[in-house]
Amino acid sequence: MRTRKTRTEYLEQLSEEELYRHAVNKTLYILEHTDKSEADLRRKLKEAAYPEDIIERALQYVREYHYIDDARFALNYVRMHAAALSRRELSNKLLQKGISREYIDSAFEAYEEEQAGLAARSAGSDDPDSDIASLSTEEQAAVRALRKKLNGRTVLDDASKQKAVAYMYRKGFARDAIYRAFDILEVSVDADAFTD
């Protein structure tokens, strides 16, 4: 009976150049389906049992051709998720993906500038979110999250208000953004509900 080779055994039989080409192809295959951070790619290549020097060479190749760019990745990630997540949640997720604090801060700054430009252009439009276009990204996300949580309700008893506030805190929103969201949605909340 013929035994099947493990992936590690197969990779060990390849020459260094074959191994390098194999790693580059694997990297390109991964990137073909979704954008990844450099740390994500490194982890995936390690999981695929490539040696560290081959991983570094493969990453250098995709860096040279700008197939990976952590600054671009951070900005695109913020663009995709800013409407639903708090700034803190986004920062934590990007840090977990191996993105540097510098790139994260730059991404938020660039996104805020984009949003300010869009808000200026869409003033007075029929967009349902045009009423919140002038708010900060954090406040816009807070309004959207609270709107979703309340599901059209504007009259809440104290227990429901407390639950909604706790939900917003768990989502990572700052106290001021939560208070602003309740104000914009015209849901009154006692100041006592905002305990830190």
Image (tube, rainbow, N blue to C red):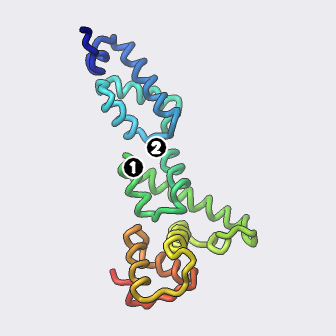
Q: Residue furthest top?
A: 1
Give the image location of residue 142, x and y in percent: 50, 71
Give the image location of residue 80, x and y in percent: 54, 53
The tag on residue 77 is: none
Left or right: 53, with 148 as reference point: left
Numbered disc 1: secondary structure:
loop
Left or right: 78, with 169 as reference point: right
The residue at which mark 2 appears reads as 70
The residue at which mark 1 appears reads as 100
Give the image location of residue 72, x and y in percent: 52, 45
Give the image location of residue 151, x and y in percent: 54, 74
Quadrant in which the C terminus appears: bottom left
Q: At 35% across and 27% down in the image, what residue appears?
A: 55
Which is nearer the eye, 156 or 129?
A: 156
Left or right: 67, with 20 as reference point: right
156 to 44, vertically: above or below? below
Q: At 40% across and 73% down in the image, what residue appears?
A: 167
